[in-house]
Image (cartoon, helix red, strand yellow):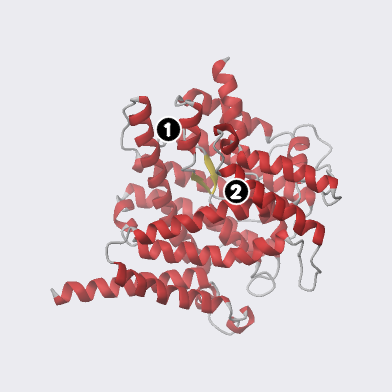
């Protein structure tokens, strides 16, 4: 009974920390309530399976999988390319779906050939800071517009939506840093429930739509068509995979330290197995047309607060999430969450990424060199974000895909500059 209660709590934590991503992505791609419900269904199904895969053949620790913030950002970026590089949202989503599969293959290959540690060396604190800041800068406009109720160019700001969004952001920050453990632990869930209620009161919450007439419905596969070759997405998937490997390693190390210090549990170095499992999980995300998952570092805080270090309740909770996804009524209810609520909660969550970015930069031992790398990377990346997408249509596909993505180009510039400076130092010595 204790394990079942613990499993329910894990299920609530997994859903609460993951639900905002598919709703926000559905909104930027203009999905209707039914399409969003199915996207949520597929994403939650994959996340539940991903937790089970990691717990059985991966790192084998109670670390829940959540939608990767990096993939989340790329979804938003590619939504902006619809009508420019992609003729429809389905074409863009097909490229993203294929990107998950590319990433899954890369995860497995890098682990099998022992390149995980070597490739990670490219992502020094300066490069990681540049990437995170470019991602945040690129997404901030989307979050703010969503919190104002702006969907298309020319839309007027809705004061009621702005009011509701500001209230949610303030509550989210208060609850995230609350001294009462259970409030901070469930801050995302509480903010969503309060925000949803507030938007119902002000008349800005959509009605719950029926997805299908079935009581039970299993997630579909390859919703946007067969995998395709997209050279721009290959480059994007390469960089995303390297950063996700670094993210995975950090999450594993945090949980290892917690289990050793607080629970006197011995752990094994399972980074390689974790990487292979992450590859399998990304392949699942591609096959089920969902968002790529990543181990969430916040799991350590959850385990420390609840004192649930055992894998049994974690696996039970993951199974509960998988089972829930086959009931359309449950998923359509989640899909009716107002998009501004998801954006407001996400705004607060992503503010933590800004803190993470500055902590990364502070860890660089060569600060002056790091400043130069960051300056060039940010100027290149942010500058390209202001270049109209139509300006790249005459260029070859691969070059257009890279240059039209300030996030990737700025990161490549930072890597290139740093490697050049390191090469010059080695030559001088």
Which one is closest to the eye, mark 1 or mark 2?
A: 2
Mark 1 neighbour class, 10 Å CA radius: few under 14, some 14 to 19, many 20 or more: many
When asked about the image quadrant of residue 95, the answer is: bottom right
| Figure check: 373 above or below 43 | below
When asked about the image quadrant of residue 252, the answer is: top left
Q: Is residue 46 left or right of residue 266?
A: right
Mark 2 neighbour class, 10 Å CA radius: few under 14, some 14 to 19, many 20 or more: some
The foreground one among 122 and 186 is 186
Residue drawn at x 33%, y 69% is: 370
Q: What is the residue that sits farthest to the front in this orientation?
A: 179
Which quarter of the rendered picture does the C terminus lie within? bottom left
Q: What is the residue that sits farthest to the left in this orientation?
A: 429
Q: Which residue is mark 2?
A: 173
Q: Is residue 90 left or right of residue 130?
A: right
| Figure check: 186 above or below 348 | above
Residue drawn at x 80%, y 69% is: 155
Residue drawn at x 42%, y 60% is: 358
| Figure check: 418 above or below 394 | above
* Residue 44 seen: yes
- Judged from the image, the secondary structure of the residue bearing numbered disc 1 is loop
Q: Is residue 276 left or right of residue 185?
A: left
* Residue 229 seen: no
Q: Which residue is mark 1?
A: 61
- Judged from the image, the secondary structure of the residue bearing numbered disc 2 is helix
The foreground one among 7 and 328 is 7
User: How far from the left and from the top, in percent, is residue 316?
Assistant: 56, 25
Q: Is residue 418 left or right of residue 184?
A: left
Which quarter of the rendered picture does the N terminus lie within? top right
User: How far from the left and from the top, in percent, is residue 300?
Assistant: 45, 36
């Amino acid at each position: 009974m204790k394990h079942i209660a613990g499993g329910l709590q894990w299920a609530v934590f997994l859903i609460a920390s993951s639900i905002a991503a598919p709703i926000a992505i559905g909104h930027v791609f203009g999905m209707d309530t039914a399409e969003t419900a199915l996207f949520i269904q597929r994403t939650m199904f994959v996340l539940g399976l991903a937790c089970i895969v990691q717990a059985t053949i991966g790192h084998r620790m109670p670390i829940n999988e959540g939608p990767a913030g990096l993939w989340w950002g790329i979804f938003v970026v590619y939504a902006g390319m619809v009508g420019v590089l992609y003729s429809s949202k389905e074409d863009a989503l097909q490229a993203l779906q294929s990107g998950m599969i590319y990433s899954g293959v890369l995860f497995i290959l890098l682990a099998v050939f022992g390149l995980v540690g070597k490739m990670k060396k490219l992502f020094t604190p300066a490069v990681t800071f540049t990437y995170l800041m470019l991602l945040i800068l690129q997404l901030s406009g989307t979050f703010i517009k969503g919190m104002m109720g702006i969907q298309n160019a020319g839309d007027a700001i809705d004061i009621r939506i702005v009011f509701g969004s500001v209230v949610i952001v303030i509550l989210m920050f208060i609850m995230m840093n609350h001294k009462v453990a259970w409030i901070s632990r469930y801050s995302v869930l509480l903010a969503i429930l309060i925000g949803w209620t507030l938007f119902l009161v002000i008349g800005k919450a959509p009605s719950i739509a029926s997805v299908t007439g079935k009581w039970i419905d299993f997630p579909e596969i390859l919703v946007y068509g067969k995998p395709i070759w997209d050279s721009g997405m290959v480059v994007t998937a390469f960089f995303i995979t390297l950063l996700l490997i670094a993210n995975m390693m950090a999450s594993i190390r945090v949980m290892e330290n917690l289990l050793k210090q607080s629970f006197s549990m011995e752990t094994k170095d399972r980074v390689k197995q974790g990487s292979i499992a992450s590859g399998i999980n990304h392949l699942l995300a591609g096959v089920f047309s969902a968002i790529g998952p990543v181990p969430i570092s916040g799991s350590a805080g959850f385990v420390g607060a609840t004192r649930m270090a055992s894998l049994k309740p974690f696996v039970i909770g993951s199974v509960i999430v998988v089972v829930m996804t086959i009931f359309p009524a449950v998923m359509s209810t989640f899909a009716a969450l107002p998009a501004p609520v998801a954006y407001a909660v996400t705004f607060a969550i992503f503010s933590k990424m800004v803190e993470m970015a500055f902590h990364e930069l502070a860890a660089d031992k060569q600060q002056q060199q790091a400043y130069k790398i960051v300056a060039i990377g940010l100027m290149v990346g942010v500058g390209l974000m202001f270049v109209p997408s139509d300006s790249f249509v005459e260029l070859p596909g691969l070059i257009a895909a890279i240059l039209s993505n300030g996030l990737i180009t700025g990161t490549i510039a930072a890597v290139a500059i740093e490697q050049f400076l390191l090469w010059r130092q080695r030559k001088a010595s």
